[in-house]
Amino acid sequence: MKNTPFTHKHIALGAKMAPFAGYNMPISYTGINDEHATVRNSVGVFDVSHMGEFILKGENALDLIQRVTSNDAAKLTAGKAQYSCLPNAEGGIVDDLLVYCIEEHNVYMLVVNASNIEKDWNWISGFNTKGVEMHNISEKTCLLAIQGPNATSTLQTLTDKDIINLKYYTFVKGTFAGVENVLISATGYTGSGGVEIYFEDKDGAADKIWDAIFEAGKDKGIKAIGLGARDTLRLEMGFCLYGNDIDDRTNPLEAGLGWITKFTKDFTARPILEKVKAEGAQQKLVGFEMIEKGIPRHDYEIKDAEGNVIGRVTSGTQSPSLQKAIGLGYVKTAFAALDTEIYIAVRDKALKARVSKVPFLS
C-alpha cells in the first residue's frame, strides 16, 4: 500500500486511515459531519495526492486528446481547464477526467482517478499513433484541494497570484508558500468554492506547503478533511463518482453528461452515442430524496409502486447539510421526471422516495 507525502501528517492528526485505490488514505479526523460543516462554512484541506496526472506534449497532443475524450478540448486556451470523459468502444466510460491546457495545442495535463491510472494510461497510449510525448507524473505530483468559502482568502497571503478572483475552471502557475512552479486551479468537487494546488515534493515542499496553509487558516478554523466528507459534499452537489455513478457500462448521455459530449468532432464511440441521443436513453441518472426514513446505499434496487425493479442506487447518504437522506441512481426513463415517486429496497422493505432536482443544494 502506498503513502502520500502527507501520510505522516494525517496519522499525527489522529485520522482514521484505510486503503483507497492502493493508497493509505484518511477517511475522517473529527467525524464526517463536523468535517463536512467545516468545508461548507469555512475552509478545509483534502489530500488528494493519490489522483493521477499525465502530461501530453507535442504538435499532435490536442489531436490525441480530441480522439479519446468526449468534450471539445479545442476550445481550451492556456490557463483553462475542462471536465471530460474517456468513452470506450461501446460508449461506456473508461474514466472521467480534467483536461488542463498548459500551452495551447502543445502541452496538456490530464487528471484522472486514482483507481484508473494504469487503465487510462494504457487506453490513451493505444490511440497515440502520431508520436505524442506522454509522461505519467502521478507518483511525483502532490495535490491538495483547499475548499470552502474562506479558502481563497486564506491562501491569498501565500502567493502573489490573484486567486481570490480565479474564475471557475481556470488556473495559474507561480510561487506558493515559497515553492516555485505550483499550479493553482479552481475546479472543485465540493460546491463550496476553493482551489487545488499541484506541485512536486522537492526539498521538503510538501511539508512546507501543508504547514503554511494551516498556519494561514488557523484563525478561520481550518481543518484537514477526509475522503468520507469528500463523498457527502460531492453527493449534495450531484457530482458523479467513478465506480459508483459512472463506469464502463454507463454512457455519458444517460449519466446526465450530455454537456461534455460534443458531436462537433470525431471521438471514440461517437456513432454509438449519436444513436443514443437520437433514440433517447433507456435509463437516466437521477437524484432522489427519501420520503420514508432509511439510508439508500450503492446497488440497492429501485422499484415502482407495484414492486417492479426499475433501476439501482449508485450513491446515497444522509445529507449533513439538508438533514435528510439523498441519493443518485439509474431508473428507466419513464420514471426520471421530477417528483416521480419511486421506492428504494432497504433490506426487506420498499421505502418511498421522490425524484428531485440536482444539485440537492440550491
Image (cartoon, helix red, strand yellow):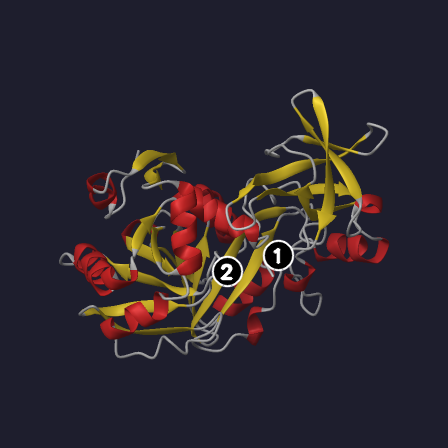
Q: Is residue 197 above or below residue 346?
A: below
Dot placed on the residue nearer the N-terminal end, 2 or 1: 2
Secondary element at image label 2: loop
**279 or 163: nearer the eye?**
163
**147 or 159: nearer the eye?**
147
The C terminus is located in which quarter? bottom right
Q: Is residue 104 above or below residue 237?
A: below
Question: Could you tell me how far apart the alpha carbons at marks 2 and 1 are, in whole angstroms?
Answer: 9 Å
Q: Is residue 200 above or below residue 281?
A: below
Q: Amino acid at mark 1?
A: Pro
Task: Give the label on residue 150, or none.
Answer: none
Residue 189 vs residue 18: left or right? Answer: right
Q: Are the residues tagged 2 and 1 within 8 Å (C-beta)?
A: yes
Q: Amino acid at mark 2?
A: Gly
Q: Residue at x 75, y 52 (%)?
A: 272
Name the residue that disc number 1 marks.
359
Q: Quadrant of residue 133?
A: bottom left
Name the residue that disc number 2 marks.
191
The N terminus is located in which quarter? top left
Query: Residue 173 appears at what percent x and percent y?
Result: 32, 73
- Mark 2 is surrounded, within 10 Å at the Cα level, by few (under 14), some (14 to 19) or many (20 or more) other residues, namely many
Residue 203 vs residue 25: left or right? Answer: left
Is residue 330 visible in the rendered structure shown here?
yes
Secondary element at image label 1: loop
**309 or 53: nearer the eye?**
309
- Mark 1 is surrounded, within 10 Å at the Cα level, by few (under 14), some (14 to 19) or many (20 or more) other residues, namely some
